[in-house]
Image (cartoon, grey):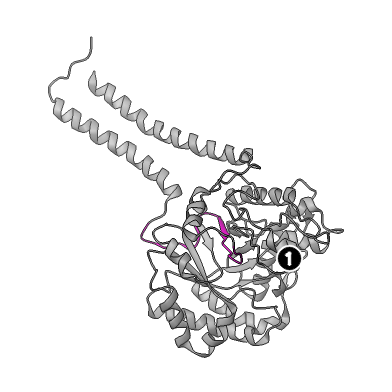
Amino acid sequence: MAPRWKSGDGRRRLLLLLCCCLLAFPCHAQVTNVSHRSDQAIHSFVGTYGINYGRIADNLPPPEDVVRLLKLARIRNVKIYDAEHKVLDAFRGSGLNLVVAIPNEFLKDMAANPSKAMDWLNENVQPYYPSTRIVGITVGNEVLGGGDTGLAEALVGAVVNVHDALRMLGLDRKIELSTPHSEAVFANSYPPSSCVFRGDLMVYLRPLLDFFSKTGAPFYVNAYPFLAYMSDPSHIDINYALFKPNSGIVDPKTNLHYDNMFEAQLDAAYFALEAAGYPRMEVRVAETGWASAGDATEAGAGMVNAVTYNRNLRKRLFLRKGTPYRPNRVAKAYIFALFNENLKPGPTTERHYGLFKPDGSVSINIGLKGLVASSAAAPPPPSLMAFKRVRAWGWIVQYAAALLPCTLIFLALAT
């Protein structure tokens, strides 16, 4: 016979309802906080994986379709190399984090005239922010070590003037300011513990690093194991560059073991920063990738290696862990690049870094969804499928844990 409610049924029912709410809702909040951040704060990088959206091509899809592609691929961090208004318009309301860029050709004017920095912000940021989620501005790209002394001299002044203009607009704590560097800023990088900045560049780097240490900006570096391997294939194990099983290296000074070049390059930057007096500065990767095609002289270029590197890198970043020397600093990287860019000058590799083809189909298949089906499509890597299954089971277990006490209370009150 079904149990009957006794006297005080209303109070018991109310108690039951309150208990269920108190037990269930904390678990629900904990789950959603894993993947969603507060709408009240702007974060320059969500998670660990981002991508560079270059557009030196005449056959790319319109920016609106690119936004759709990024959402299908679940890529939330995007970096562009200018502030094209069509792109800024397309990103309105998308929720995607966007880093825009001030190209090198603007730096000298901005350094010499602070009003130029304000003019640029008024034209390229103010009309779009915050509906377009602009979370960062890069001032120049690979300026130092490029041989242009005048440009190098202008970099710090341009950064300072842009920051001052952001402060006047009340955006200096909402939009991150940075500048990406190439490996050319280092005197050496092997072994990682020996890495230091080039002495001839310290006259520019010192004030720049001083400034970024005050604003809390990371040190951005373009790290390409592919380029390192291509420059010396006879002495570098390609498995070490591709995250594949290998004996790795041991840094003789620190005794730290590295089984992949990506982490070694990150730690080399950390060692250089520490030697220069900036041990607390975070290192982030502004560009990394592997070309899917190349000339006969470009060792390692090819689709198999491009798939291997990009898949293994994505898997490595999804672990959300640090490096051997900075285990508590989670590695974060922007992949190069979203598309193959058919108008890029230079050797063949320059036009074959894209994860996607211009029609939106997959080029380098790492398990991401494209706008159209690809004949070469393959299932996602097993490790990524396992990662998704683990998260799904975690959700189920948490909700089961919330519902079980509610069930027990219900039974106790009903008897």
Q: Is residue 410 left or right of residue 257?
A: left
**Picture layout, residue 129 above or below residue 234:** below
Q: Is residue 69 left or right of residue 364?
A: left
Residue 206, image x, y percentages: 62, 81
Q: Which residue is depicted at the point 74% across and 62% down? A: 348
**Picture layout, residue 187 above or below residue 242:** below
Quadrant housing residue 48: bottom right
> Is residue 57 part of the magenta span, yes or no?
yes
Q: Which residue is depicted at the point 49% across and 70% down? A: 84
Residue 404, image x, y percentages: 36, 28
Residue lying furthest right: 234
Residue 56, image x, y percentages: 61, 67
> Is residue 384 part of the magenta span, yes or no?
no
Is there any visible trace of residue 254 in the rendered image? no
**Picture layout, residue 161 above or below residue 297:** below
Q: Which residue is depicted at the point 50% across and 48% down? A: 72
Q: Which residues are magenta?
A: 39-58
Front-most of 68 and 50?
Answer: 68
Quadrant housing residue 169: bottom left
Q: Secondary structure at mark 1?
A: helix
The main secondary structure of the magenta stretch is: loop
Residue 4, image x, y percentages: 18, 16
Can you say which quadrant of the picture contains the C terminus? top left
Q: Amino acid at mark 1?
A: Ser
Front-most of 175 and 127?
Answer: 127
Q: Is residue 307 left or right of residue 87?
A: right
Is there any visible trace of residue 384 in the rendered image? yes
Q: Which residue is mark 1?
A: 193
